Amino acid sequence: MAEEREDLQKLKRIAAAVYDYENDPRWPDYWSNILIPPHMASRSDVVDHFKRKFYQRYIEPDLVVEGMSSTPSQSAKPSASSSTSSSAANDGARARNGGSTTRNSGASAAAGSNTTSMRWDRNNTVFIVAVLAILPLVPRSLSNRAYRLSFMGTACSSLYSLYALYGRPRAWNLQAIQVYFQSIIATKDFIYFIYCLTFVTSHLCLKFALIPILCRALEYVARFLRRNFNRSTLYRKYLEDPCVWIESNTTTLSILCSHAEIGLGYLLIVSLFSWQRNIIQTFMYWQLLKLMHHAPITAGYHQSVWAKIGRTVNPLVQHYTPFFNAPISAIQRWWFR
C-alpha cells in the first residue's frame, strides 16, 4: 500500500510539473497575490513550489506538497539595509508599472479566451461525436462515420493548438523545420495529432481507441464549463459535481488513457494475424508508444503501466518460457534507445 501511494504521488507530481499554467487564467491572479521578496520571486525552485501549491489548491487536492527549502545560497542573503531599499524600489516600480501590467494582462487574456473558445468548440463536437461512435444502438454506418470524425476533429484541434502556441517554423528550410519539430515533438498536442492520424487513415475500426480521445475532450469541456458557466443555475444543479470530479481526477484519467494506449498496441499485434492486418500502422503506433514512454508529459503514466506489466509477465517468462529472454532483451534495448 505504501509503495502504491508513493507511485500515485509521483504521478501527481509529474502531472503538476507538466500542467499548462500559462494558459490557466487563475495562475496570474494566484501568483500576483503571493507576497515574497523580489530576489526570491526570480528563483525557479520558488516558482515551482508555488505552482505545486496552485495545482494542489485548484486541480489535485490530494497532492502532497513538501515544504520549501529554507537554505538559500550565501550570495542570495542581502543585508538589512539593501533589502529595505530594494523592497522600496520594487514597490515603486510596481506602482509605476501597474497600468501597463494590467493592459498587457488584459490583451493576453483576450487572446487566450479566443483560443480557449475555439478549443472548446472543437472538443465539444469531438465529445458528442465520440459518444455517438461508441453507443451500441447507433446504426453501424453512422457509428463508423462518427468514429472517423472523432479522430479528424481531435487532429484538427491538436493542430490548431500547436499553431496557436508555437506558430510556424521561422524559415522553410531543413534546419529551421528540424528545430521546430524538436520543440513540439514531446508536446501532448503533437502526440495526439499523430495518434489520430494513425487511426483515421486505417481501415481497422477499433472503438477502444476512442478512450483517450473521450478523456481528453472531457477534460477540456469540464474546464471550459467551470470557468465560463459557474454562475449558471443549470450548471450548478446538474454539471458542477461531474466537472469538479473530472478536474480533480485528471491523474486517474491519464492513467486510464495510458492503459488504453498500451492495450491498443497489443491489439494491433493481434490484428496482424487477421485479414485486417496493417503492418505499417502497427509499426508506426509502436513508434508512437515509444515516444509516449520517453516524452516528459506522458512518461510517468506509461512507465508506471509498463512497470506493472513487467512485474506480472517477467516471472511467468522466467518460469515457463526462458527461451524468450533473448528476444525480450533485444526489444528492450530498442525500446530504451
Image (cartoon, rainbow, N blue to C red):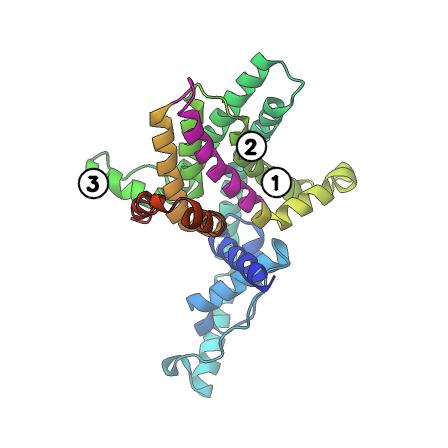
The residue lying furthest to the front in this view is: 320
Q: Earlier in the sequence, mark 3 or mark 2?
A: 2
Q: Nearer the viewer, mark 2 or mark 1?
A: 2
Does residue 231 show up magenta in the picture?
Answer: no
The answer to whether marks 2 and 1 mark residues whose Cβ atoms lie closer than 8 Å is yes
The residue shown at (67%, 43%) is: 243
Q: Is residue 77 left or right of residue 252?
A: left
Q: Earlier in the sequence, mark 2 or mark 1?
A: 2
Q: Amino acid at mark 2?
A: Asn
Q: Which residues are magenta?
A: 253-277
Looking at the rendering, in which quadrant would you find the N terminus?
A: bottom right
Coordinates of residue 183 in the picture (x, y in percent): 33, 45
- Measure the alpha-carbon separation of dots 3 and 2: 34 Å
**285, above or below 82, in the image:** above
Disc 1: CA contacts within 10 A as few (<14), some (14-19) or many (>=20): some
Q: Earlier in the sequence, mark 1 or mark 3?
A: 3
Check disc 2 and report its element: helix, strand or loop: helix
Tag 1 residue: 224
Q: Check residue 123 in the rendering and tell me which mark sits there, or answer none.
A: 2
Question: Residue 277 occupies which quadrant of the picture?
Answer: top left
Tag 3 residue: 175
- Measure the alpha-carbon separation of dots 1 and 3: 38 Å
**234, above or below 125, in the image:** below
Q: Amino acid at mark 1?
A: Phe
**213, above or below 165, in the image:** above
